[in-house]
Amino acid sequence: MIGYLLEIGQALLALLLAPGLVGFIRMVKARLQGRRGAPPWQPYYDLRKLFGKEAVVSRNASWLFRFAPYLIFATTVAVTTLVPLVAAPLPFDAAGDLLTVVYLMLLGTFFLALAGLDPGTAFGGMGASREMTVAAIAEPAVALAIFGLAVGAGSTNLGRIVAQTLSNPGAVINPGHLLGFAALFIVTLAETGRLPVDNPATHLELTMIHEAMTLEYSGRYLALIEWAAGLKLFVFFSLLANLFLPWGVATTLTPGGLAIAVIALIAKLALLGLAVALIETRIAKLRLFRVPELLGVSFVLALLSVTSSFLLR
Amino acid sequence: MTAGAKDTMFLRILFIVMITAWIVGAIASIVAGKGVIARGGAALGASVGSAACLLLGITALVTGQSLTFSSARMLPVSGLMLRLDGLGAFFLVIIGLIGLASAIYGYGYGANYEGRYSLRMAGAMLNLLLLALGLQVMADNALTFLIAWEAMSLSAYWLVLTEHDRAETVRAAVWYIAMMHAGFAALMAMFLLMAGGDLTTSFEGMRSNAAALGGGLRNVIFVLALFGFGSKAGIVPLHVWLPMAHPVAPSHVSALMSGVVIKMGIYGLARVTLDLLGGGPVWWGGLVLGLGALSALLGVLYALMEHDLKRLLAYHSVENIGIILIGIGAGLIFHSYDLTSLAALGFIGGLYHTLNHASFKGLLFLGAGSVLHGAHTRNMEEMGGLIKRMPVTALCFLIGAIAISGLPPLNGFASEWLVFQSLLGGFNIPKPEVAVMMPIAVGMLALTSGLAAACFVKAFGITFLAIPRSREAEKASEAPFSMRVGMAILALACVALGLAPFIVVPALGRVLAGLGGLPDTHQAFTLKLSLATPGGASSVSPAMVAIGVLIILGLIPLLLRALRANRGLRVGDSWGCGRIGQTPRMEYTATSFAEPLRRVFAELYRPTKELTIDFHPESKYFVQSIEYKSEIMPWFEKYFYEPCLWLVRRLAMNVRRLQSGSLHLYLVYLAVALVILLLSARW
């Protein structure tokens, strides 16, 4: 019973923290660029404002356009119950593994891309086309990074991977693990639409990907999509944090352990947020046709990670 | 084996109903010739037969019974043998399911052909094709197998030729029949080698004889099987006929051909390599895995560049055959290392994907048929906005698109998950050089599924969403009732097969038990809601995921209420950067959607571009018309088939010299042939 409550609590925690993470990255980025920037809780205000507004829908759009935000939000929230954020293993661990997590999020991307095409504008199509290109090319690196993690644990289930790493701390510094981390980090940047793949802060048609797809959305629909995008970032960061550095994750459900787990999670996410903000201030956006090269690097890293885990087994 | 005639009475009755219904359907269609009676008779025969076929397959799978027919009373022609076992029963389920949906759909779809094309031929051949397929998977000796195989190829050939007055159709049919006969020759040689020259040897005889064959001979048999069955399945590089023949056939026949007929190649490969030969050396599996990965990736890459909806789907069949073969190849590799439960997992993944691909590809072809029926075009660039005009078709096509992209919780995800899990077992292989094939296959499989998702965003988005791009699309109307029923059956199958892998997988475990010495993994998979690999290493439950997503979807309105969200909705124009009035010409097209990927994979596509701009004579600033033409490199046609055709033509020219026209010379040929025959008979 406690386990199921924990599942719900974990999903609520993710929902609550996700906009804060986005705001935190924006703030750090602003400071690093010598601006003052908005406070980290600005995204919460934005969401409240969007939820309070009337929605405008294009007359060309169909039911799919109005359904997509709900589905994207629902799949992303569903994913948060599968990822070990504070405790492992969770009661839903057997319901979905790492592949389910990745493909559920791809389902959301699939619908977002369709919704981008639905109003019939050139921008939406452009965003959809680019998003699916990036998602498709990122896929092999994701799969191989999963493979690398799974070889160690003998399973793709998240709880098992965390438990395996916790019981065998030495594995963290082996080259397979580190290369896998690097590969998944690059993929995270691509999947969550960060620099150098996509710039979350631009509406310039030459460069935008994610923003182009959501251009026609407004009101509560836009709020749901923005919130889901924040959650997606949160989930990918948590995967990076807890699969590769699982310390802090509670294995027994004591109040003290859970409190430590929450603090450890926030600390790890803040660290990753800092890293991303730092990267985003130091590098420029890549041309769209150079992105496959970056993802190719990530694929090679993942392949090396798997091969070395094979050899060192 | 069968316990007695009494226990299998139900199976026997179903078998007789199935055969009779198909034969009656064919006769009804021939007698009536045209009109509602011909269409109805053919559809009724085909659907009753298919329903019996589906039930027969399911009953045989559930009870684990088998059936044997070899008595002279049952079969008028001597030398024919039929036997239904688990593997055959599984394929009967596939035939029955797609056959049923296609037959019902065909009733409405055939109305288009009234007075234009021969309904007599189409109806009769549809029933004969189903009959040949049903007998195919029950054949128990080489002779029966080959007769059914040829009947299947020929009836499909006639069906492809239905719209016979188009040059495109005739060309496709010729390619099809030529490739099928090249494959047939290989299969004939294979069976002759395996049966020691006597085609009436039963499969049981071949099975016990297989171990005694020499290693070299077994390798030759395997290569012949791979070529023969590969040409049917459409493995790269033997796939070229597939994107030509499947699109030109009537859509319900396309569904049957892509869903079922090409799967006979998979059936044959599994039957011969695993069952009759009992597995082989590692390189067999390696070759199958490699060809599978290549087919999967090239299939989807060519599909991306295709803007003819049915050709796009045909290329996706190449892709999915590749995914199936990745599973089967992995299974064969594990089998050769005696890792039997992993081998079973690979085969289960492959066979499960066979069933799943049959259902979603059948569905997508039926959907494409409805679009063709409603909007009178296969060109995606002339479609758009059909979701409002054809809501049922759009929903069914969307379900098929999600399923084929391997997204949870539909059936494509379940089987791709199993294939992935079997590849994950690769680290158990003692040889690193073999083991390293597995992660590479994982990468290719993942790229394939990502590209498939991109391709189906294109296929669904451009076809069904946004503003209609042509007058025809604007006037499109929903498909008639029978066609919607056909699509709905397969859409439900996609959902059910996706949610219930815990029923399908143990059944497949039982099907494989005993084939090539595989263990019965029917118990190894937990029969709970979640599906786990043997030993419970990894598990997933699409049903629970689906329930979870549905619960959250239901909670969102509550969340919106709690947040006091404004529920108002206003309909307005799309944002046009200040420009008022949006036309379809401003929309993204299928070509532009695929453009980034075309540039990424430019090395493969080698696109050629031809741009003709017609300027106004007065000023270069006014363009009168623009013509843009772009083609991609047909590698296989250019570097494989063209030299082959050239060689065949040269040979034919040389052979022609024998035919001088002189009667005396022909008499000499006769005499020489006679002498040679007599001499060889003397030896």
Image (tube, rainbow, N blue to C red):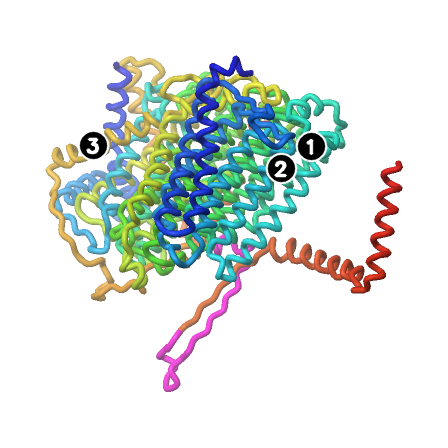
Mark 1 or mark 3: whose residue is earlier in sequence:
1
**Residue A90 seen anywhere in this rendered image of the structure:** yes
Q: Which mark is residue B146?
A: 2
Name the residue carrying label 1.
B199
Indicate the amino acid at tag 3.
Answer: Gly
Which chain's residue wears label 2?
Answer: B
Mark 2 or mark 1: whose residue is earlier in sequence:
2
Do marks 1 and 3 share a subunit?
yes
Which chain's residue wears label 1?
Answer: B
| x and y percentages locating residue B602 in the rendered image | 52, 56
- Asked if residue B610 lies in the magenta stretch, the reply is yes
Do marks 2 and 1 share a subunit?
yes
Mark 3 or mark 2: whose residue is earlier in sequence:
2
Marks 3 and 2, how far apart in space? 55 Å
A98 lies left or right of B4? left
Do marks 3 and 2 share a subunit?
yes
Q: Which residues are magenta?
A: B598-625
Q: Which mark is residue B554?
A: 3
* In this rendering, the label closer to the viewer, 1 or 3: 1
